[in-house]
Amino acid sequence: MNRVRMTVRIRGFQRWAMSWDVFLVGFPDRVTSVEQLQPDFRESPVGPVDEVVERLRTDCAVEFGPRGSTGGAVEGDTWSIEVSVGRDDPVKGVMLCVRGAGDEVLAVIHHIARTLGCVAIDCSSGEILREGSAGSWHDFQQWRDRAIGPTPNRGPHG
């Protein structure tokens, strides 16, 4: 599927569906960088799939489809996050596909990670996304706009 041509409707306007991806995973507390992971590293389970979906729904305002659905979304005025829990039970990780612009979305990402007891990995850089850091979010937005052109309703960094 060509992600550049696909569009998604967010709060009444069209956005290019190219996403900045963040993976949420259970890491030991002592790990501060992905380079510290040993080759035999095994993530800590996030939890049973039904429990993870319910925590995302009630604590993070993620809207899921009908019962049994493991894909959902949460939206702001200039951004959206597609949330994919997957069907593995227990859940081994959660993928966030972030679209749009603005730094407000970073606080939501960190809230979701804290709620699930996970570490957020910036898939573009491979680094842990720390509170107070934008990771590669700003670079992604600039790259996306050069690649496909600017879109309406940009925030201060988009």
Image (tube, rainbow, N blue to C red):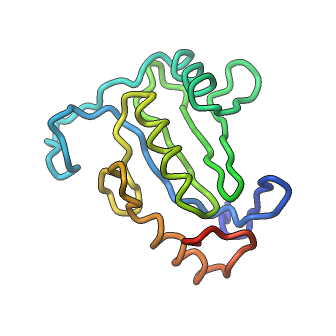
66 vs 2: above or below = above
Task: Please identify the quadrant where the C terminus is shown.
Answer: bottom right
Q: In the displayed structure, would residue 132 be above or below residue 116?
A: below
On the image, which quarter does residue 63 sit in? Answer: top right
Q: In the picture provided, is 79 more to the left or to the right than 14?
A: left
Where is residue 66 shown, x and y percent of the image?
76, 23
Residue 89 spot, x, y in % from top left: 47, 19
47 w.r.t. 24: above or below: above
Q: On the image, which quarter does residue 79 sit in?
A: bottom right
Name the residue at 41% across, 65% down: 136
147 relative position to 38: left or right:
right
Residue 72 lies, in percent from the top left, at 66, 36
Whether residue 128 is situated above or below residue 4 in the rendered picture: above
Q: Residue at x 80, y 55 (%)?
A: 9
Q: Quadrant of the N terminus?
A: bottom right
Of all residues, the one furthest to the right in this rendering is: 12
Q: Residue at x 15, y 36 (%)?
A: 30
Which quadrant of the structure image shows residue 125? bottom left
Q: How many marks?
A: 0
* Residue 68 % position (x, y): 68, 20
Which residue occupies 55% across, 52% down?
105
Depth check: give the residue in front, 30 or 71.
30
Looking at this view, is 55 or 157 the one in front?
157
